[in-house]
């Protein structure tokens, strides 16, 4: 494996740092040459190559200048080449603290055995006074693994054992996927070299071919998405040796590993998720029974994504995942992560280290450590916070953070226990559900079948696992409401088309519809309608349902197409059209604007794009009793998502308003829904806007004029 020199490090740093920072880092390098002068590693190489390679690994993660600099001198104290005070005087207290913390962690193996890995991991995180400490320590361990071959078997076994039990779990939780994956492969290489080489030979035999196929597949998919004007970000990977090894160990055959080549596409909204997966499957034949829709049917831990496995370029099998950026954030950092809680009912001691690391890992993706130190300090305070140990009536021990409540305790036992908890006895005395448990308390829960949690509990509980399970309950409940609403919307659409819902949605048609829309059940279709994945009209169109034809008065038809039911200067004979910038709605005050060659454009009087004093302005009024649908665009600014979407759709049906599209936007830390809808008149639009404003989490509603 290649050893990188200082010039290699500078090449990487120049790709993302200004020259002034390179000069700053060079000061550390000059001191490193003094620290490691004349020293050799067990490999026979100059010792300074080790800190340079540690810094190089961190540079590939685009770490900040202080972290890179400290990596170059990270062994100064442990080698007795510099004191804390000398580092502080030369480079500042931040650098001195980082190097001192690394030294403390390095000395752990001399005083602490790894037979209690959970406690060991806690100590490592606790000793990290700055997030840079952990980053440097992991890069240090990775480079040591790369050169482990020169050590004897006893040392190799200790390093591998410590890495597997301590460093890999923390690196996994911190989201350091690249480093974690290489650590796993290197540990496997030493612990089971025969199987490692067997897998490696199979991959290497086709590595170039696999990478070429992956590149071709990415290019082809990018071409398709660009042609359809879809904004996206695309990631790809060849499955790691360790990942393949684990599957083979579980009895899988090589030909049964369908995710050897993987592509992930991130898009802005749910509609684009389905568009992308549809485009991919229309281009590449999907493998039967390998499509998973975790958007319409999220996993219990709220994970959402679309998965498909297809025969792609060069007749190879590719796993393609499509999700929104928000879904990816939840999957990578929320309760859907691979290391998230798993329900346990065996009464074993549980802890909140995962919760601490869940927040701590966010810093991996942040280049400017200084701006995030306040966040890091808050997490450190939470980590240092005392834990309490409480008991079940059977004597089992449950670990909770200080300040935890009986509800936290209940959800530690099981989600169903938490959902049905109505009260609690602590040391045989009845307490309120917001009671703060104390160390050594004996807790007995009172449950009632059919009881449901309260959203108010989210303000009471202290553990993330309890919060996530409460949210999961309400997600499921909201899904049931969406299903009911979706059915109502289809019933309403059938009435508009003068057809009977029961005549249309027969068992035969439902089965046909599920196949066409690739849905598992009619409930999935109802849910998709209510969440705007499909319009009610498009669902009926799939079944070829159309409104019975009516005789149309030719004169009326011609008049409507000519003037849109609008009188221009009292005349019905002047060609007119509605302006798309303001989308005037029947009943509101309007004016006409005379264009060159395109007749009269009808604008709302509130439109910011016209000058009412212009000589091109002409009087315009609506004819009486028009029956039509008019486009209106709205922005609904909200504090949080909650069940607002359900409320908005429900209120729209109340005013006979058809919501054509609705997208959640997060722009400049402002959250809002961008809505396009069809309305009958200005009165129903205004009533709808006023009604939406009454929703508790809605801050304001604006009509959009472009």
Image (cartoon, rainbow, N blue to C red):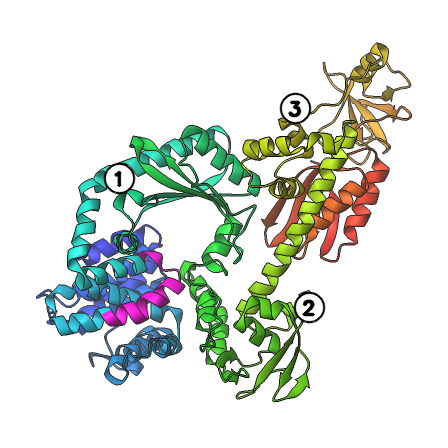
| Residue at the spot of label 3 | 544
The relative height of residue 51 versus residue 331 in the rendered view (above or below) is below
- Residue sitting nearer the eye, 144 or 100: 144
**137 and 26: which is toward the camera:** 137
Please state the horizontal and vertical placement of residue 130, each as a whole percent of the image. 39, 72
Q: Secondary structure at mark 2?
A: helix
Query: Is 169 included in the stretch rendered in magenta?
Result: yes
| C-alpha span from label 3 to label 1 | 45 Å
Which circle marks residue 227 in the picture? none
Check contact, mark 1 vs mark 2: CB within 8 A. no
Compare residues 693 and 649 and report the one nearer the observer.
649
At x 22%, y 42%, the residue is: 207
Is 671 above or below relative to 493? below
Name the quadrant containing residue 81. bottom left
Q: Is residue 603 above or below residue 322?
A: above
- Quadrant where the C terminus sits is top right
> What are the residue bounds of the magenta stretch?
161-178
Q: Write down the residue under mark 1.
A: 210
> Is residue 635 among the parts visible in the rendering?
no
Describe the element under mark 3 as helix, strand or loop.
Answer: loop
Does the magenta portion include 99?
no
Q: Quick check: marks 3 and 2 in contact, CB under 8 Å?
A: no
Residue 117 x, y percent position in the rendering: 33, 76
Question: Label 2, on which residue?
Answer: 456
């Amino acid at each position: 494996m290649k050893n990188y020199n200082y010039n290699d490090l500078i090449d990487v740093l120049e790709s993302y740092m200004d020259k002034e920072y390179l000069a700053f880092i060079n000061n550390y390098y000059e001191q490193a040459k003094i620290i490691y002068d004349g020293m050799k590693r067990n490999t026979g190489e100059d010792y300074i190559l080790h800190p340079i390679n540690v810094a190089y690994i961190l540079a590939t993660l685009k770490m900040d200048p202080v972290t890179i600099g400290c990596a170059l001198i990270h062994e100064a104290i442990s080698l007795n080449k510099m004191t804390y005070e000398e580092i502080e005087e030369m480079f500042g207290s931040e650098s001195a603290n980082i190097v001192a913390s690394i030294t403390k962690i390095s000395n752990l193996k001399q005083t602490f055995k790894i037979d209690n890995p959970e406690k060991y991991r806690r100590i490592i995180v606790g000793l990290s006074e700055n997030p840079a400490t952990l980053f440097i320590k992991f890069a240090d361990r990775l480079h040591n693994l790369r050169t482990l071959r020169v050590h004897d078997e006893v040392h190799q076994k200790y390093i591998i054992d410590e890495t597997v039990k301590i460093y890999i779990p923390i690196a996994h939780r911190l989201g350091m996927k690249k480093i974690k994956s290489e650590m796993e492969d290197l540990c496997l290489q030493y612990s089971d070299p025969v199987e490692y080489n067997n897998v490696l030979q199979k991959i290497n035999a086709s590595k170039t071919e696999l990478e070429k196929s992956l590149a071709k597949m990415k290019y082809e998919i990018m071409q398709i998405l660009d042609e359809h004007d879809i904004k996206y970000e695309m990631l790809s990977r060849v499955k790691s040796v360790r990942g393949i090894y684990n599957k083979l160990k579980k009895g899988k055959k090589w030909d049964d590993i369908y995710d050897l080549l993987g592509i992930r596409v991130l898009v802005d909204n749910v509609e684009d998720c389905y568009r992308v997966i549809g485009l991919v499957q229309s281009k590449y034949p999907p493998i039967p029974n390998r499509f998973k829709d975790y958007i319409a049917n999220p996993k219990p831990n709220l994970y959402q994504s679309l998965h498909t496995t297809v025969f792609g370029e060069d007749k190879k099998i590719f796993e393609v995942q499509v999700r929104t950026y928000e879904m990816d954030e939840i999957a990578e950092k929320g309760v859907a992560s691979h290391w998230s809680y798993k329900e346990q009912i065996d009464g074993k001691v549980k802890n909140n280290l995962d919760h601490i690391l869940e927040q701590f890992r966010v810093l991996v993706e942040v280049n400017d450590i200084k701006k995030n130190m306040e966040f890091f300090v808050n997490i450190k305070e939470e980590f240092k916070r005392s834990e309490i140990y409480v008991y079940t009536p059977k004597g089992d021990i449950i670990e909770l953070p200080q300040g935890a409540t009986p509800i936290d305790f209940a959800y530690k036992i099981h989600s169903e226990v938490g959902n049905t908890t109505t009260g609690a006895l602590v040391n045989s005395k009845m307490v309120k559900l917001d009671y703060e448990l104390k160390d050594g308390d004996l807790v007995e829960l009172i449950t009632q079948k059919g009881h449901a949690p309260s959203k108010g509990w989210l303000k009471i509980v202290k553990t993330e696992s309890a919060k996530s399970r409460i949210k999961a309950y309400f997600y499921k409940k909201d899904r049931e409401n969406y299903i009911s609403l979706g059915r109502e919307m289809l019933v309403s659409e059938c009435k508009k088309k003068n057809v009977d819902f029961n005549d249309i949605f027969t068992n035969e048609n439902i089965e046909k519809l599920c196949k066409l829309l690739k849905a598992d059940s009619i409930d999935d279709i109802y849910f998709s309608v209510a969440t705007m994945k499909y319009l009610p009209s498009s669902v009926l169109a799939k079944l070829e349902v159309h409104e019975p034809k009516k005789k149309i008065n030719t004169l009326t038809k011609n008049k409507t197409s000519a003037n849109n039911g609008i009188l221009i200067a009292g005349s019905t004979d002047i060609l007119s059209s509605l302006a798309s910038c303001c989308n005037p709605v029947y009943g509101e005050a309007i004016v006409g604007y005379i264009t060159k060659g395109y007749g009269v454009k009808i604008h709302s009087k509130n439109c910011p794009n016209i000058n009412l004093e212009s000589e091109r302005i002409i009087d315009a009024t609506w004819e009486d009793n028009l029956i039509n649908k008019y486009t209106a665009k709205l922005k609904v600014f909200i504090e949080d998502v909650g069940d607002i979407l359900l409320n908005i759709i429900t209120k729209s049906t109340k005013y006979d308003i058809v919501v054509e599209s609705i997208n959640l936007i997060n722009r400049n830390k402002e959250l809002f829904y961008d809505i396009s809808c069809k309305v009958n008149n200005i009165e129903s639009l205004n009533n709808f806007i006023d009604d939406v404003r009454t929703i508790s989490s809605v801050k304001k509603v604006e009509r959009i004029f472009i």
